[in-house]
Image: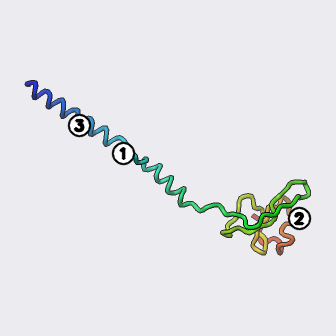
């Protein structure tokens, strides 16, 4: 084989190796497909509900708790223990007196 033929063979082998490595590597500037799917799922998740009222009270144990409150979406907020009959959520640690100024307990959570 001549020097020109050897150079062409090396160039072809190098081009094949480069093409194979580019095909196996993720595209530059684009996240892997799994990461972009996770990001899309996170952005599609609904936002946590926000409490409309901001009152607090001290319970019999001395702990300061959030007073029963409605949420902006009507969804259950984190830490709620009961749904009151007026639609608000209670964060009471004890059953006695829960939702007492909100029509009573509609459902324990």
Q: Secondary structure at mark 3?
A: helix
Decide: few, some or many residues near mark 1? Use Cα within 10 Å; few <14, some 14-19, many ≥20: few
In the rendered image, the vertical position of residue 57 relative to residue 28, given as above or below = below
Instruction: Point out which mark residue 91 bears.
Output: none
What residue do we see at 71% from left, 67% from top?
Answer: 71
- Asked whether the residues under the numbered discs 3 and 1 touch, taking CB atoms below 8 Å apart as contact, a structural biologist would say no
* Quadrant in which residue 57 is drawn: bottom right
Left or right? Give the position of 93 relative to 21. Answer: right
- Residue closest to the far right: 60
Q: Secondary structure at mark 2?
A: loop
What residue do we see at 75% from left, 73% from top?
Answer: 87
Q: Earlier in the sequence, mark 3 or mark 1?
A: 3
> What distance separates the C-alpha of mark 3 from that of mark 1?
18 Å
Instruction: Write down the residue under mark 2.
Output: 96
Q: Earlier in the sequence, mark 2 or mark 3?
A: 3
Q: Secondary structure at mark 1?
A: loop
Q: Earlier in the sequence, mark 2 or mark 1?
A: 1
Left or right? Give the position of 93 relative to 71. Answer: right
Looking at the rendered image, the disc whose residue lies closer to the viewer, 2 or 1, is: 1
Left or right? Give the position of 1 relative to 62. Answer: left
Instruction: Write down the residue under mark 3.
Output: 16
Instruction: Write down the residue under mark 1.
Output: 27
Looking at the rendered image, the disc whose residue lies closer to the viewer, 2 or 3, is: 3
What residue do we see at 78% from left, 72% from top?
Answer: 106
Front residue of 16 and 47: 47
Q: Which part of the image, by quadrant, shows the C terminus?
A: bottom right
Decide: few, some or many residues near mark 3? Use Cα within 10 Å; few <14, some 14-19, many ≥20: few
What residue do we see at 21% from left, 32% from top?
Answer: 13
* Percent coordinates x, y for residue 74 in the rendering: 68, 70
Front residue of 84 and 68: 68
> What distance separates the C-alpha of mark 2 from that of mark 1?
61 Å
* Percent coordinates x, y for residue 22 in the rendering: 31, 40
């Amino acid at each position: 084989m001549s020097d020109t033929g050897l150079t062409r063979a090396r160039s072809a082998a190098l081009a094949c190796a480069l093409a194979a490595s580019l095909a196996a590597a993720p595209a530059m500037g684009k996240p892997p497909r799994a990461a972009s799917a996770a990001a899309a799922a996170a952005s599609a998740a609904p936002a946590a509900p926000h409490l409309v009222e901001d009152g607090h009270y001290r319970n019999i144990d001395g702990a300061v708790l959030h007073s029963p409150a409605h949420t902006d979406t009507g969804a259950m907020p984190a830490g709620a223990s009961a749904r009151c009959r007026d639609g608000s959520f209670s964060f009471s640690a004890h059953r006695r007196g829960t939702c007492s100024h909100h029509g009573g307990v509609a459902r324990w959570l």
